[in-house]
Image (cartoon, coloured by chain):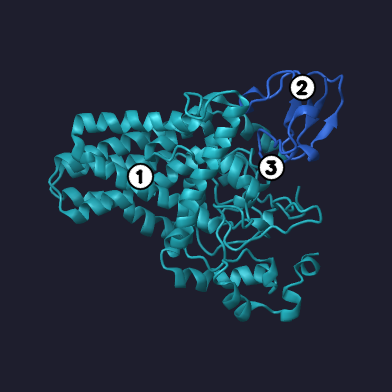
Amino acid sequence: MTALNIQNSEPQGGLSWAGIKKYFFIVAILVPLFQVFSAYQTVTTEAAGLWLWLLVLINIVVVPVADVLFGHDTYNPTQEQEESLKNDGFYVWVMYLAIVAHWLALITTAYAVSVVDLPWYHFLGAIIGIGAMHSVSFAISHELGHRVNKKTQTWVAKFATAIMGYAHFNIEHNKGHHKHVATPEDAASSRMGENVYKFAIRELPGGFVRAWALESSRLSRLGKPTWSLSNEIIHSWLMTLAGFGLMVLVLGVQILPFLIITSFYGWFQLTMANYIEHYGLLRQKLDNGKYQRCEPKHSWNSNFRLSNLISLHLQRHSDHHANPTRPYQMLRDYPEAPQMPTGYPTMMMMTLIPPLWYWVMDKKVVAWAEGDMNLVNMDGEAKAKLFARYHKKPVDQANDTAEVIL
Amino acid sequence: MSKHQCPSCSTVYDERIGCPHEGYPAGTLWKDLPEDFTCPSCFLIEKEEFKSIAQNKESP
């Protein structure tokens, strides 16, 4: 599959990291439980709305600091260990329980902001906190959504995206993003010189249109209309409708803006994650007009311990794209694949300040392409400027892409 | 009835089973699948890259 090295540095068993690591994935359940705790404290203590900032604090301070403190997770399972990891139901149950906890967190927070009289800025804390939580829901839905041959897991995946009303995620991700990743055709692969806001305008509608078309063509092969109860996007919408509808019924219609804004912010969390995962990386076209197969070098990785646990190894992104059906607990680190300097949460925050993002990442993209900007997925408007600034080959070769690529 | 396997994730397309969820009912022959048929598990590999596997082998 790949020529890159995979390190096996730690044995399994005893109190070694390999032996106890599985229990640390419970952090995916703890994130929403922290939010439930915030909601409880908001209702019952004098500090009230201040508690709504707890998850924001965890996201922007605790996780980045813990990543620095605990460093990289160099453990990769051996082939023997992979067999036991593969069939261990623990890893699936963590996800099921986490999704229940995520819904509980949204419901309890909606209750808290309904019954407590809060200044506007504490609403902001709740929205950003829930948004951070939604990025974990996406990671879980992402994992479950790849298990296309396991019915229960694909249903729970829909239940997970229903939390923020992003019903088309799994279809778009599996059939759209994975197939077209690291090409200009992919709405969910960002281009060098394209800031996250411009990317959002391309990615958010682009992803939906592609998913709807894919589902529509599947249904037409089945002889069913697009608007039918067999449409998997509609399944998840109905779950959102039921969940949000019940909250509106119980808490009043004034909770609706809160639910909508937290959902939108959750969508933007996914946008940020998509933005960082393949920034600037490009698969080359082969003689037959098709793109080369996705290799480990076509994804940005980050191997920090805590952020990898919270994201269910999503940061081991190269292995995920090379082997999309490999369960999260088995994903391996490729030290030679493109690496980002921090964990995904910090990198995602960095995207909000485009000059900072470019300063950190552009030189990494240039190094990845060894100075040949023909090999980079670039924003059309930024292309001339980026070529002038970074391209190391004579300009007359720039148009002869076939020669350069080969 | 033939079988074809995805070289990336090892998923097998068995003509006897088809892939009903994707709209290819049991009995759909390999040659009748569209050219843009993609592996229904990993969605990476297109039809032309699938490998034909032994026809008398039992279904997985």
Is residue A96 among the parts visible in the rendering? no
Q: Residue at x 44, y 44 (%)?
A: A136
Of A354 and A117, nearer the camera is A354
Disc 1: which residue: A263
Q: Are marks 2 and 3 on the same chain?
A: yes
Alpha-carbon span between mark 1 and mark 3: 30 Å
Quarter of the figure that contains the C terminus of chain A: bottom right
Q: Chain of mark 3?
A: B
In which chain is the residue bearing label 2?
B
Q: Residues within 10 Å of mark 2 (few under 14, many from 20)?
A: some
From the top left corner, tell me how far across and down residue A307 is, in percent. 48, 52
Horizontal side of A86 relative to A284 (left or right) equals left
- Please check whether the numbered discs 1 and 3 fall on a single chain: no
Chain A visual colour:
cyan
Whether A196 is drawn above or below A230: the answer is: below
Q: Are marks 2 and 3 in contact (CB under 8 Å)?
A: no
**Residue shown at 47%/23% (left/top)?**
A229
In the picture, which chain is blue?
B
- Which residue lies under the disc numbered 3? B44
